[in-house]
Image (cartoon, helix red, strand yellow):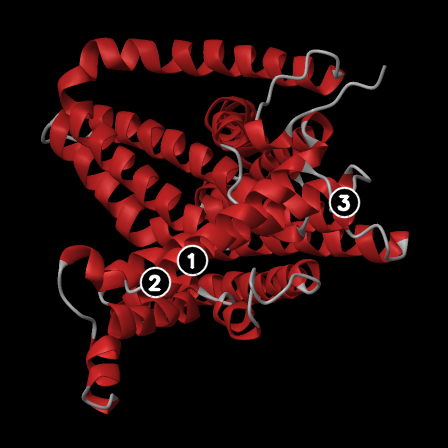
Amino acid sequence: MTRVVMEGQGTFVRVRRPAFWLYVGLLAFGLLYVGDKFSGAFDHLAGALFVPIGLNAVLAAVFIWILGRMDLFEREPAAVRAAALLWGALVATSIAIIANNAMVSLITKAYGVDFATKWGAALAGPINEEWIKTLGVVCLVLIVREHFQRSMDGLIYGAFVGLGFQVVENLSYAINNAVSNPNSDLSGSVSVTLLRIFIAGPWSHPVYSGVAGLGIAFAVTQTGRKRWVRYGVAALCFFAAWALHFLWNSPLPAWLPKGLAFFAVYGKGALILIFFFVLYRISARREWHWFIEIMRDEPEAVVRPEELESMRTLRTRRLARKKAAKDYGLYGKRIVRRLQRAQVVLGEAKARCERADGDLATAPDVLVGRANILSIREELSSPAKRRIGRKTRKQDGEDVGAEPR
């Protein structure tokens, strides 16, 4: 009997897949290692770490909100996003600490203290951290391959891996700076946390790992392309993630005037973000074309051509809702929002059905998706504001043009 996985449930547990147990084992190792490293610090510096923990929680919440809005045509399951976050926070961080300490020690012995101080982070960080974070995306592919359908999925999961890594790394810096700060533990931990959030936060590990994750997803989803193209893109994306990390960690030139250091630092960050958003826009455009293709055979009662066009970006969706608010009032705006969500759900249902070689004419979730859309459209077609006792602007215009009885 064939075992059927219900993708919509977003389950992550796959006890029959060896990669799942590899993930569990490495997660247990990371939890023990990071817990051992941090437990002593929390015993002595608990009062100085409440603020950094709160600031990093806000940072994580902001990134989670942004990442949740980046994939316009699918919402990645919460369980898989949490698994990616935990890999970055525990597995990648613990292995990176061990590897970075060893590499910096080796660089110091080989090239001296001055060189290691200047270039140690630029060399050790990208070399040791990017591969283990990218391995987390590969592990997710091996566990829940059904949740990797397009390149955007890899970008989102990779960014979640990087986010987990960044939060724990920020806390480790807060602990180290609290111990070494001559003024107070609290000022040391808070100052370095604010510095890392506002200087490095917008273009740090979620960006690097998102780029590498996009390459992994491209390699495993673009099965219609030649193998050397798929793996070549994955290799280029990994190298790009490494290069972006190296660019950020590399020291500024000695000849650069100190007055320009601020602009040089943010200039590097701007270059990193520009590169990331170019890749994101390319991937988002491919997502929209996928949505058009999968909804093309639907009748206009389900999705109209102008609605397909309006689904392209968050901005075009807002404009469609704004137009509905103008024509039908706030109630119409809410109805159009529900309609857009229902159309995305139908697209996901059709994609799942096609991957399972099912029949779109009889698949239950596809039929339910279509029925929901028709029901919502019927609400939109009715006199919306009549429900709350006043007319819409559109109805007022119709009344003005009507002949008196």
Q: Which residue is mark 2?
A: 382
Which residue occupies 46% across, 27% down?
89
Residue 251 in the image, given as x and y percentages of width and height: 44, 56
Name the residue type under label 3. Glu
Q: Are marks 2 and 1 in contact (CB under 8 Å)?
A: yes
Report the residue at 56% width, 63% height from top: 301
Q: Secondary structure at mark 3?
A: helix
Mark 3–mark 1 contact, CB under 8 Å?
Answer: no
Considering only order in the chain, which callout, 1 or 3, is on the residue closer to the N terminus?
3
Amino acid, disc 2: Ser
Residue at 54%, 47% (x, y): give it: 371
Q: Residue 354 bears which disc, if any?
A: 3
Up the image or down, 199 lies above or below 325; here it is above
Residue 218 position, x and y percent, is 72, 51
For mark 1, what is the residue? Answer: 378
Q: Alpha-carbon distance for marks 2 and 1? A: 6 Å
Residue kind at label 1, given as amino acid type: Glu
Distance from label 3 to label 1 (Cα)?
A: 28 Å
Image position of 92 with respect to 363: above or below: above
| Residue nearest the viewer, comparing 264 with 286 | 286
Pointer 1 local density, CA inside 10 Å: few below 14, some 14–19, many at least 20: few
**Is residue 370 found left or right of 390 in the rendered image?**
right
Most extreme residue toward the front is 405
How many other residues sit within 10 Å of disc 3, few (<14), some (14-19) or many (≥20)? some
Q: Quadrant of residue 132?
A: top right
What residue is rendered at 48% in x and 42% in y? 121
Residue 285's spot in the image, x, y percent? 60, 67
Near-viewer residue (48 or 64): 64
